[in-house]
Amino acid sequence: MQTINEFDREFGTDEQCRAFLAKMRWQTGVRCPRCKASEKVYALAARPYHWVCKSGAETVDKQTGEVMRCHKRNGYRFSVTSKTIFEDTKIALNLWFKVGYLMLTSKKGISALQIHRVIFGEKSTHDYHTSWFMCMRWRAAMAGDMYQPLSGIVEADETYIGGKDRNRHAAQKSARQRELGTGGYRYGKIGVIGAIERKGNVVARVIGSQDAPTLAAFVRNVVSKKVSLVATDDNKDYNYIDRNLRHESVKHSAGEYVRGEVHTNSIESFWSLLKRGVVGTYHNVSAKYLPFYLNEFSFRFNNRNNDMMFADLITTCSQ
């Protein structure tokens, strides 16, 4: 990863950022973000990093169902930021890049308030919500870090994010909820499940239910046919994992944490990193936005040895 001085030299101006975005977005030539065509796409000489597509192709918007067409006569005009997280922004692109850089270089994350202080300053006309919005856009882009199915030795485990119910205000206390399969109780905490390839990538998801079908289905979906071992704790819900997979567990309830190559230390280390970030940096994360924070911590962890981490993030920022 670059130092802050190296980053500023490479991305100090909007011109540098637009050139880099165009390079990473269209490595084989400019394509229309609407119809994906590369033919009959013309650069606008009067407006750098703007093009017009006159392919005549029709596409259907996935969200609205509206039929859109790149007319052969008038065409569809787009810029390097069209259909990206930067579209229609009034914030300079080099500031967007700096926010993304700071998020990637902070092992336990960086709060939107700290971003606001560093990037805009206390007396800026931009308020805290601007920084928060930019951070959330980057976290949404980090979901584009599509993982490959996990192979080799894979560890799976679930955890819970949230403070203790006894520490909450009376009006915010949760109804007692029984934790399925353990005989214990959880008080308003958010269930999260994860799987990690030993010395490899991690996949984490928020789960609405902690029952056997949900936990076992998650493991089956994220592992490949090349997996040699699935290691879990002694939660009985994991017994429903595919019988064709070699599955072994350690009995935490009996004080057993390692048995040869069977342990869940790697995934528990990731949970520790996530929780230290939530408690120490963000202090509180709601259930609504927790998936975005999982994107951030997973992306940063999976690219921990990647010198091109920022460049790879830029390639995922297209909508």
Image (cartoon, rainbow, N blue to C red):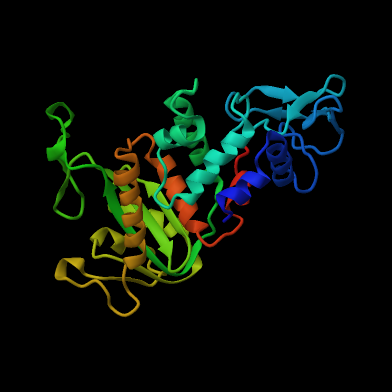
Residue 32 coordinates in the image, percent (x, y): 76, 34
Q: Is residue 210 visible?
A: no
Q: Depth check: 185 or 271 in front?
A: 271
Q: Depth check: 99 or 157 in front?
A: 99
**313 vs 271: above or below:** above
Count the marks: how many?
0
Residue 42 coordinates in the image, percent (x, y): 86, 31
Could you tell me which quadrant the N terminus lies in? bottom right
Q: Depth check: 254 or 102 in front?
A: 102
Residue 288 coordinates in the image, percent (x, y): 36, 34
At horizontal 18% and vertical 55% (from top left) the residue drawn is 182
Asked whether, in this view, residue 267 is left or right of residue 182, the answer is right
At horizontal 40% and vertical 39% (from top left) the residue drawn is 111
The residue most toward the bottom is: 260
Q: Is residue 202 visible?
A: yes
Could you tell me which quadrant the C terminus lies in? top right
**276 vs 115: above or below:** below
At horizontal 20% and vertical 73% (from top left) the residue drawn is 256
At horizontal 31% and vertical 56% (from top left) the residue drawn is 272
Residue 39 coordinates in the image, percent (x, y): 86, 37
Question: Hey, which quadrant is residue 69 in on the image?
Answer: top right
Q: Depth check: 145 or 130 in front?
A: 130
